[in-house]
């Protein structure tokens, strides 16, 4: 099906046919396209996909432990600490000592973080609409999401 897949990269024509049928290869290429669009859409806001994911998760799950959020999003602890530090510096999220275990840090989105999520909704909608259009519409998006859920559910 993909035996003659040639992609130009920096002026060179590269034969990707040996990798074309691998799901992981396709997923990675698709992720790069989606992340590139996200990064371009949110460049003026200085928002990265991981920052957005943390804020969105905290908006629906206040008080989760740092380790729970990092694990849920598949972010390594060392990287996650830097993400939370950045969100705190921007006033979008905050750490609080757990009420049940003072050694544990719980995470909360701030009122400013909630306002920020509201503010970026038009940018997010435009980004999602571009991705959905590339897929061929909402039905194609829904089918893709069903298939992706099968991989990690």
Image (cartoon, rainbow, N blue to C red):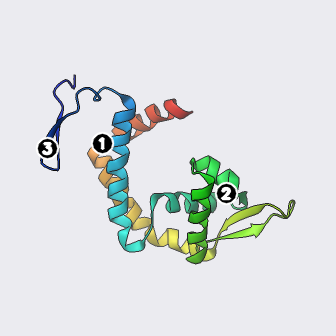
Q: CA distance from mark 3 to mark 2?
A: 47 Å
Residue 5 left/right relative to 49: left
Residue 142 left/right relative to 51: left
Q: Nearer the viewer, mark 1 or mark 3?
A: 3
Q: Which residue is mark 1?
A: 135
Secondary structure at numbered mark 3: strand
Q: CA distance from mark 2 to mark 1?
A: 30 Å
Secondary structure at numbered mark 1: helix
Query: Quadrant location of the N terminus?
Result: top left
Question: In this picture, is 111 found above or below 26?
Answer: below
Q: Are marks 3 and 2 in contact (CB under 8 Å)?
A: no
Point out the tag, 3 or 2, that comes first from the N-terminus: 3
Q: Residue at x 74, y 62 (%)?
A: 106
Query: Residue 128 occupies which quadrant of the picture?
Result: bottom left
Q: Residues within 10 Å of mark 2 (few under 14, many from 20)?
A: few
Give the image location of residue 31, x and y in percent. Answer: 38, 46
Q: Residue at x 83, y 62 (%)?
A: 103
Q: Residue at x 51, y 68 (%)?
A: 117
Which labelled disc corresponds to residue 61?
2
Q: Which residue is mark 3?
A: 12
Q: CA distance from mark 1 to mark 3?
A: 27 Å
Q: Is residue 91 visible?
A: no
Give the image location of residue 28, x and y in percent. Answer: 37, 41
Query: Quadrant location of the C terminus?
Result: top right
């Amino acid at each position: 099906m993909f035996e003659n897949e040639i992609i130009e990269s920096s002026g060179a024509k590269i034969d990707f046919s040996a990798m074309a049928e691998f799901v992981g290869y396709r997923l990675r290429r698709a992720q790069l396209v989606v992340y590139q669009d996200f990064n371009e859409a949110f460049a003026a806001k200085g928002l990265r996909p991981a920052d957005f994911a943390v804020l969105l998760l905290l908006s629906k799950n206040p008080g989760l432990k740092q380790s729970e959020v990092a694990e849920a999003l598949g972010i390594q602890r060392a990287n996650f600490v830097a993400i939370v530090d950045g969100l705190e510096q921007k006033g979008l999220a905050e750490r609080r000592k757990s009420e049940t275990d003072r050694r544990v840090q719980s995470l909360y989105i701030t009122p400013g973080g909630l306002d920020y999520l509201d503010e970026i909704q038009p940018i997010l909608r435009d980004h999602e609409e571009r991705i959905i259009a590339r897929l061929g519409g909402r039905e194609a998006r829904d089918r893709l999401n069903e298939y992706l859920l099968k991989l990690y559910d």
